[in-house]
Amino acid sequence: MQKLDNTHIVIMAGGGGTRFWPASRNIFPKQFLKLVDDTTMLRNTLQRVFPLVEPENIWILTNHLYKDIVIGEAREIPQKNVIVEPLRRDTAAAVMLAASIVKAENPKANMFVMPADHVITPQEKFHDELILANEYLVEHDSLFTFGIAPTYPSPQFGYIKVDAKDTKVTSVRKFVEKPTIDVAKEYLQQGKYFWNSGIFAWKVSTIVDKFARFLPQHYQGIETLSESWNGDNWQQNLEKVFSSLPSISIDYGIMEKEQDVFMLQASFSWNDVGSWEALESLHPGENSVVGEHIGIDTKNCVIYSGKQLVATIGVEDLVVAATEDAILVVPKNQTSKIKKLVSLLKEQGQDQYL
């Protein structure tokens, strides 16, 4: 397929999520796990965008802990395109940093932002949607987001309320944080609420202007870095600026405040793989298995193993996740407590398991 002209793609790969403990750790989080097939989540995302833009127009933002892993996974792109955040300051700082760099490279560029750890199929529909959004950007200075038509009432996703549900592109009324299950059921019935995919599109000049308006501290601090981009003092200057920034998401900081936002209703299948139970849709069957498993009278379980065999007898509705140094066994309806478990490990000083 023909590459998108004047377009840069930014992949966010700096998160250190805890919901996939014990497989996901501080030094090796979800985006580097092989949860779908024999390639990592990050590598799958890269393979999805390679047909759209040239490698030099792909940027990956990550934490300093993961630099070497990312470089190994992203062999095709220039090493300078792996942007290392010295501190975690949430997605607003990451987006502004990426925007300032893309703007320094090409002030007239279009820019897509997406997470590194989502599953999207089929690839062809994903390409069609990004091509369509890119065409809209030629004529509009609006911010664009991609919404997913909900298939069930989920309290695990953020939602987008739109003006019209039957048009491909529609204006956004508001962004809604994760609701209760009862509220999610109401959203599903109303039909004008979509899941927030976390994929965004805009002109780089537009998003920089929005930062100047809504998050001036981020704008002023990071804009000064563009003068030293890729220079000898770049990383030192970046650490100084980042340490002064508050942590805030792009959703809170920009998208929820801006009035000129449009949503493109995506036709591709999307899964944010936000919990162990998400593997059920990726690996359907009597049990959802990643790795080696043998079982007797085992039903509706999610089984994950690193290198060893997991054997089960007479169990159902469990998540069993085993790594070289830790094993998790939890009912599927209680996986929300994994984050609390990780906090307990931290409180007890058992950092070797974090």
Image (cartoon, rainbow, N blue to C red):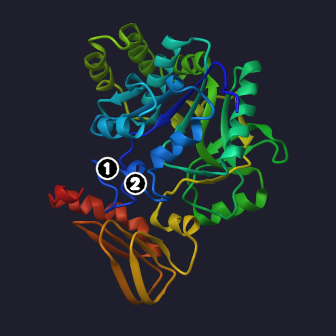
Q: Position of residue 262 (x, y in %)?
A: 72, 34
Q: Quadrant of the N terminus?
A: top right
In this orientation, does residue 229 appear? yes
* Residue lying farthest to the left in this orientation: 349
Q: How many marks?
A: 2
In this orientation, does residue 251 appear? no
Q: Residue at x 63, y 30 (%)?
A: 201
| Above or below 280: residue 266 | above
| Quarter residue 327 falls in | bottom left
| Above or below 330: residue 354 | above
**Residue beneath disc 1:** 28
Labels 1 & 2 near each other (Cβ < 8 A): yes
Q: Residue at x 35, y 60 (%)?
A: 339
| Above or below 314: residue 247 | above
Q: Using the image as rendered, state which of residue 130 and residue 255 is in the foreground.
A: 130
Label 2 crowding class (10 Å Cα cut-off): few <14, some 14-19, many 20+?
some
Q: Position of residue 61 (x, y in %)?
A: 42, 32
Amino acid at the residue labelled 2? Leu
Q: Using the image as rendered, state which of residue 95 and residue 337 is in the foreground.
A: 95
Q: Residue at x 39, y 49 (%)?
A: 32
User: For the residue labelled by badge 2, is the local secondary structure a helix, a strand or a loop?
Assistant: loop
Label 1 to label 2: alpha-carbon separation:
8 Å
| Quarter residue 60 falls in | top left
Q: Position of residue 84 (x, y in %)?
A: 34, 29
Q: Using the image as rendered, state which of residue 286 and residue 145 is in the foreground.
A: 286
Q: Which mark is residue 33?
A: 2
Q: Residue at x 52, y 14 (%)?
A: 103
Label 1 crowding class (10 Å Cα cut-off): few <14, some 14-19, many 20+?
some
Q: Position of residue 120 (x, y in %)?
A: 61, 50
